[in-house]
Structure formats: C-alpha cells, structure tokens
Amino acid sequence: MTSADSTAIFTHSWSLYDLITEHNYMSHQEIYAGVEELLRLRTEQGHYRLLDLGCGNARYLAPCLQRWPPAIYQGVDLSEAALAEARSYLTELPSQVILTHGDLLTAVESTDQTWDVLFTGFAIHHLQPEDKARFFRAVGRCLSANGRLIMVDVVREENQSRESYLDGYLKFMRENWSKVPPEQLEEACAHVHDYDYPECLSTLQEMAAAAGLDCTRLISRHAQHYTLLFSRSAVAKI
Ligand SMILES: C[S@@+](CC[C@H](N)C(=O)[O-])C[C@H]1O[C@@H](n2cnc3c(N)ncnc32)[C@H](O)[C@@H]1O
C-alpha cells in the first residue's frame, strides 16, 4: 500500500469528508474547540511556529489559527484538491502561510527547521507501525526544546485487534452517519476498512517516549477520536 492509495479518497474530492464533518460525525466541533484552547495557551508564551502534517483543507484548524495566529503556518498534504481549498480557508490568516504538496513523513523527516507546535489531524492512522515510529522520531528531532505535538486521531482500545476495532467503527458509521447517502457511506466504510491502522494509546505513548517525548497527555476523547499532547517533559501549560 502506498500513501497515495490511502489518500485517494481525499484527492478526488473533499465533498464526502466535508459532509461527514459538517454533521460532526467525528466530533470536529468539540475536538477543535480543545485544539484552539491549546493554541491559546501556547500563544501566552509568545510567538510560535506550527507545522500541520496532513492538513487537508485546514477547514477546522483555520478558525483556531485565526484567533491565535502562529508566526509561520506550514501545511503539508498529498491532496492537491485539499491544498487548493486550504489556500482559501487560510486567506485571512496574518501568519506566513506555506502549503506544501507532499508526503507528511518525508516532510517531517526532511525539515531543517524547528517547530514549536506540530499538529496532525486524522492522518497518522494511515501509517504502518514502523512508519509511525519513524514519524515520532522525526518529531522528536524537529520540535523546539519546549515544543509539543498535538495529535488528533482514531485510537484502538488496549489489546483490541484491528479487526475488532474495524467491526466497531464500521458499525458506528453505519448506525450513526445517517445523513450520508448510502453509496458515499459505503465508499467511506471501504476507505476505513482498507486504510485505517490505528494504534492503542499505550503503543503511541511508547513510540513517543522512545523518541524522547516522555510526557503524554490525553486532552479529550470522543468515542474513538482522541486528542493527545506529547512533549519532552511535563509542562505547566501546553
Ligand atoms: C481525514 S483528513 C484530515 C484533515 C484535517 N487534518 C482534519 O483534521 O480534519 C486526512 C488528511 O491527511 C492526508 N494524508 C494522509 N496520509 C498522508 C501522507 N502520508 N502524506 C500527506 N498527507 C497525508 C490526506 O490527504 C487528508 O487530507
């Protein structure tokens, strides 16, 4: 499986993901309210630079950034369609905005800058375990001394198999995502079935600790949708 396979659904169109998020089926409203609060707390410490890996169209992060603007915002995504939309969602942002078409793992491994906030929303679960470990190692290298990784993603229960996770998540989609037309719902289910490889929290925590990010905080959980904050050591504020 290539990264391009797992992002095909986001490459041809954003309408399906937009429909899902407009009905708040993945709790974007609550999740991004929490993310905004983390950015607010970070802003109290002064200027910050933010790298967004798998930014999509940045539709939900854009209002948070607008209220608590970083000095530099860089978004990376494999979907040109998403980046074109991101450009317009971010148009009012007073920050320096850089949008990069490319693979997120390559981007984080090759950045020659340090970042105060690394953000990633619903993208890392597409990576295989060895690539998730590479992701954390690269994050550990490019975060500033007091930097932090904000990760929004789906997470498996401890000791739950991928098959059992998928059974539960597909059931949740079919029972709750009632405003998604049946054909599109099946497209979304097929995407999840074929490309979602969520880890359990302890695995993410171990990978982060191995990369020097020894502090993990659970910021919120809405069903299987988690917001996690990783940093080098416990910090009083984000
Ligand atoms: C579910 S969308 C999430 C968008 C947004 N971050 C959010 O939280 O709503 C996942 C995004 O990650 C991107 N993506 C997934 N794997 C990627 C990879 N290896 N490199 C770059 N982008 C990737 C997809 O193209 C898509 O735009």
Image (cartoon, helix red, strand yellow):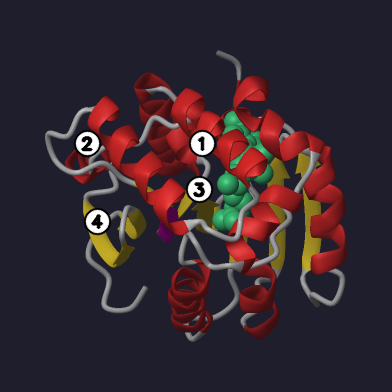
Count of numbered tags: 4
* Element at label 4: strand
Q: Residue at 80% of width from left, 61% of height from top?
A: 97
Looking at the rendered image, the disc whose residue lies closer to the viewer, 4 or 3, is 3
Magenta highlight range: 147-152
Q: Residue at 23% of width from left, 32% of height from top?
A: 164
As drawn, is 125 to the left or to the right of 185?
Answer: left
The picture places residue 162, in percent across and down from the top left corner, at 28, 28
The residue under label 3 is which amino acid type?
Phe
Residue 216 is tagged as: 4
Judging depth in this view, the residue of 135 and 111 nearest the camera is 135
Q: CA distance from mark 1 to mark 4?
A: 30 Å
* Element at label 3: loop
Judging depth in this view, the residue of 32 and 8 nearest the camera is 8
Q: Choose top left, top right, bottom left or bottom right for residue 147.
A: bottom left
First in sequence: mark 4 vs mark 3: 3
First in sequence: mark 2 vs mark 3: 3
Q: Residue at 39% of width from left, 33% of height from top?
A: 137
* Element at label 1: helix
User: Which residue is denoted by mark 1 in the rendering?
Assistant: 189
User: Which residue is denoted by mark 2 in the rendering?
Assistant: 203
The picture places residue 88, in percent across and down from the top left corner, at 87, 64
Is ligand 1 closer than 8 angstroms to the Cβ of mark 3?
Answer: yes
Q: CA distance from mark 2 to mark 4?
A: 11 Å
User: Which residue is denoted by mark 3 in the rendering?
Assistant: 122
